[in-house]
Image (cartoon, helix red, strand yellow):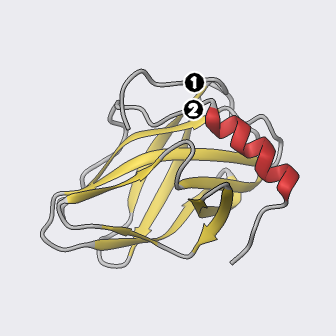
Amino acid sequence: MRRLPLVTAAVLAGALALTACGSSDSGSDDGAGLSVGSAYMPQPVSDTMAAGFLVITNKGAAGDVLTRVTSEVAGEVTVHKTVGQTMEEAKSLDIPAHGELVLQSGGDHLMFEQLKRKPLEGEKVAVQLHFAKTSPITVEMPVKSATYNPKTGH
């Protein structure tokens, strides 16, 4: 498990604190019970890293697992769990049956690392979510202002 250096974690924590999970739908339903909504990326303050947030809803009777995330905008997209004051890379995250996996500011989230370009507010970033059981889902993640703070949501 890789840990972010303290300075990087502090900068990212500050940026993450400025944002929260929104409520607008911006994903798809693959027909197998999983759907994605509330996706967004705050405009990155760094040239090399960005955060991403979304909610995966599972209306199915069986749980699934988010195993990998890819995007053309980054060399690597990792999933991070927030444990206390520390962000730690996670290999996968569970999506419970009849439940949600919430990736939000201050909690579990996506980290876009080795940015190939810096996404700008108003653009959309394509993200492909890979699961243990369900076919991949592609989400168009809108880039919001660095200080975007949805009024509703999780």
Looking at marks 2 and 1 on the same chain, the residue that comes earlier in the sequence is marked by 2
The residue closer to the viewer here, 1 or 124, is: 1
Whole-percent x and y of residue 57? 27, 53
Looking at the picture, which amino acid does disc 1 mark?
Tyr
Residue 25 x %, y %:
32, 35
Q: Is residue 116 left or right of residue 87?
A: right
Q: Quadrant of residue 83?
A: bottom right
Pinpoint residue 59: horizontal percent, then vertical percent. Answer: 16, 58
Are circles 2 and 1 on residues that touch, CB within 8 Å?
A: yes
Spatial CA distance of label 2 from label 1 is: 6 Å
Q: Residue at x 68, y 29 (%)?
A: 120
Q: Is residue 113 above or below residue 12?
A: below
Q: Secondary structure at mark 2?
A: loop
Q: In this rendering, does residue 116 appear at all?
A: no
Q: Can residue 118 be seen from the camera position used here?
A: yes
Whether residue 57 sits left or right of residue 83 in the image: it is: left
| Mark linked to residue 19 | 2
Q: Is residue 6 left or right of residue 56?
A: right
- In terms of secondary structure, where does tag 1 sit? loop
The 10 Å Cα crowd at callout 2, few under 14, some 14 to 19, many 20 or more, is many
Q: Residue at x 75, y 68 (%)?
A: 3
Residue at 18% over, 74% down: 62
Q: State the mark number for residue 21.
A: none
Instruction: Say which quadrant the C terminus sits in.
Output: top left
Residue type pointed to by label 2: Thr
Q: Is residue 45 above or below residue 73?
A: above
**Where in the figure is residue 19, as x and y percent of width and height?**
57, 32
Residue name at image x 57 percent, y 45 percent: 106
The tag on residue 148 is 1
Q: Quadrant of the N terminus?
A: bottom right
